[in-house]
Amino acid sequence: MPNKPRKPIADGTWECIDPSVGQNVWQLKLPDLGAEQIHILQAHLGLCDACRFDQALEKTVESGLNKGDLTLPEISIVHRRDQQWWQNPAWAGFAGAGLVAACITLLMVLPPRAEGDLVQVRGECLDTGFNRPMEGEVVSTGGSRLSWKPIEGAGSYQIQVTENDGPFTWMGTTNRTEIDLPVLEPKEGDQKYRAILQTIPADLVTPGSISVSFRAGHRSEVLWDRLSKAPLWVLLFGLAGLPLLGFSARRILIRKAPSI
């Protein structure tokens, strides 16, 4: 293909003396080039060091490639600087894993939406006094924690937990606004419990007025409860991360796959 006109370099050496002629030197390879044009181009080569050097270099490279003395490295046709960040498997995998991790973390940290008549959005506290669990929340049978709002004048608190359709009853006392539940024995079916908060001294609140109902289940049931009650914006983190993880894994597998 035609040589582009050279720009002058700092010291003035190896500069084509007549770029309008030098850019056509490649035409000497054409079989049907006219005698007059051949004469003009050859005369130019006799005078122009730059074009003569380029022609010698081109012949040397062409000869080396034909003989196998020179080899060209494999170069991707994709320009790396033109790639978007998500087209890089490493960055895509990192971003995807971060989004999925953020989704799982938010599901576990934020309180779920309450069920029943006292329905609320995540992050808000009910007026019953309990912060966690929320009304209708599924907690782990392996041990969970009850927490509530402080009540002015209370020196300590007494918590009573009973099973709705079973013999389980538990009572605990603390001077804090939280208490750990004992390990609940897993059972078949829906395990429903009610926790009742009472202050000491007892005349600060009406007996039974501060209570919360919750369920107990395995970790998979807890996770499903969180997913089913999660707001859309939390789920979008996970949904956005899955395609990026899939893209990253696919590109890595393609790179590691043996070529046939």
Image (cartoon, rainbow, N blue to C red):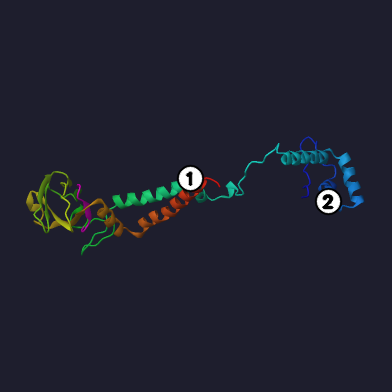
Q: Nearer the viewer, mark 2 or mark 1?
A: 2
At 56% from the left edge and 50% from the top edge, which residue is drawn?
Answer: 83
* CA separation in Å, label 2 and label 1: 49 Å
Residue designated by label 2: 30
Of residues 105 and 79, the one drawn nearer to the viewer in this rendering: 79
For label 1, the SS is helix
Magenta segment: 135-143
Residue 18 can be seen in this image: yes
Query: Outermost residue, front direction?
Result: 260
Residue 155 can be seen in this image: no
Q: Residue 17: percent from the left, percent from the top? A: 85, 42
Residue designated by label 1: 90
Q: Residue 43: percent from the left, percent from the top? A: 90, 43
Of residues 137 and 40, the one drawn nearer to the viewer in this rendering: 40
Figure check: 115 above or below 11:
below
Q: Residue 140: percent from the left, percent from the top? A: 22, 50
Q: Is residue 140 magenta?
A: yes
